[in-house]
Image: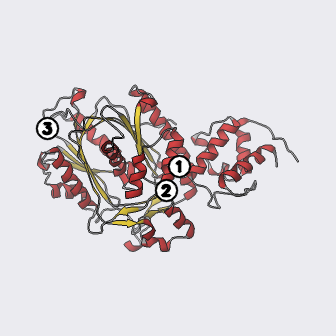
Amino acid sequence: MNDTTREITEFLSAALRCEVGPDDDYFALGLADSLFALELVTFVEGRFSLTVEVEDLDLESFRTANRITAFVRRKTGAPEFTETP
Amino acid sequence: MTPHTAAGSAFPVAVRSAAWHVPETAVAVPELTELASLSESERRTCLALGIESVRADDALNAAALGELAARDALAHAGLAARDLGALIVVEPRAPETLLSSEATRLQHLLGAERAVTFTVGGLGCVSVTPALLAARGLLCADPELGDVLVVHGSKPAAAGRYRHPVTVNGDGGQALLLSRDATAGTAGTGPGPGPHRSAPVRLLDIAQETNGEHWDLFHVAYRDRPTSEWREECRDVSTYSFRLAMEGRGRLSGLLDGLLERNGLKPGDVRGYVSQNLSAAGFTFTEESLGIRILPVCRDNLRRYGHLGPNDVFLNLWTAIERGELAEGDHAVLINVSPVAAWSVLLAEIGPQEERAQ
């Protein structure tokens, strides 16, 4: 797991008050509501210095930590994230 | 694409009087019969909405609720129904019969024979906004027209009252009597009263946007089943909780910024915000999205009445005035959101309260 995904899973686990893995679909699990969505998008915007525009609001980009990582990479143009053991 | 926003006005409207009718009978949310048919997750969500009870009376349909409120609003203003210039009915969630007219039904019940009468709607609880836009347009365009009465009777469309995962619907009627605003220098020569000089509320500006992508996100299928099986259903809860919620953040933020800017106001100039009563979490979402505080009265009315559709925002505004949370000269913003999807913000100025309607 790279640093970014790890950071995102830590946020998700804290926000949802349960352990969230990098490929866990917390929307499909019924864990997400609109307040969580707001918290999540605000976290992604603030932590990675980007703006989530209306055209970015594809749920597929936010269903799992790994998908958020890919979204952040697309938005910021970052090539790859550092892997840590 | 930049959406076109229905907004901008140099024609304020006076809300001359307002009245509501809610049934006396209260039903506690934990005692709703439909709870037994919900999944455990749905039941938990329903009980966590921040709604303790709703008012309900099977003997009062939407037309009756609207009529009772309308009679009160007219009586408060001392205006006879026959002198109304227009009657605008915000459509009921479900008409009792097709082909018939809920608007002329109310016209007949009230005796508003001379009123230009029609129905508006299509935007869920935001539907009060196009009614106000229509009323303002009539008052502005036709100097001969008397006052305009906007009426809505709120009854759930479905057999049950719970809309997962959003709210619990209550029963209630609302009537708003709108006049030309004398302080704006508008002339009034029509058969109704002239420009109003001491209205309890002046409606300064209106802004509204919609996104048709979500036109059927919530719906009640009815053609192929008996009414006992009608249910308010969400096509995709994730779309509601994520896509629509986050789009709403941006839409409301843009609408609010624009509303304040074109009226020469800063956020600190707004004394209070009210929104529609969906859930306690909904209030928190709006507050965190916009960086504002919703007036406490909204949570109180949510707890007591549940969701009354297009009637919530003005009920909250009037209750806030009654409680002294808003006073003469204050500016207030009324925020409305509908999952169809529609968003609106209204800018109001509080006037003198000698003629308080309720």
Q: Nearer the viewer, mark 1 or mark 3?
A: 3
- Quarter occupied by residue B110: bottom left
x 54%, y 42%: residue: B288
Circle 3 — which element? Answer: loop
Pointer 3 chain: B
Same chain for mark 1 and mark 3? The answer is yes
Pointer 2 chain: B
Mark 1, residues whose alpha carbon is within 10 Å: few (<14), some, or many (≥20)?
A: many
For the image, the number of numbered tags is 3
Residue B246, compared with residue B228, is above or below; it is: above
Circle 1 — which element? Answer: helix
Same chain for mark 1 and mark 2? The answer is yes
Determine whether, in the image, residue B136 is placed left or right of residue B168. Answer: left
Residue at numbered disc 1: B244
What's under tag 1, amino acid-wise?
Leu
Q: Do the residues labelled 1 and 2 touch (CB within 8 Å)?
A: yes
Residue at numbered disc 2: B217
Of marks 1 and 3, which one's residue comes earlier in the chain?
Answer: 3
The tag on residue B273 is: none
x 38%, y 53%: residue: B301
The tag on residue B193 is: 3
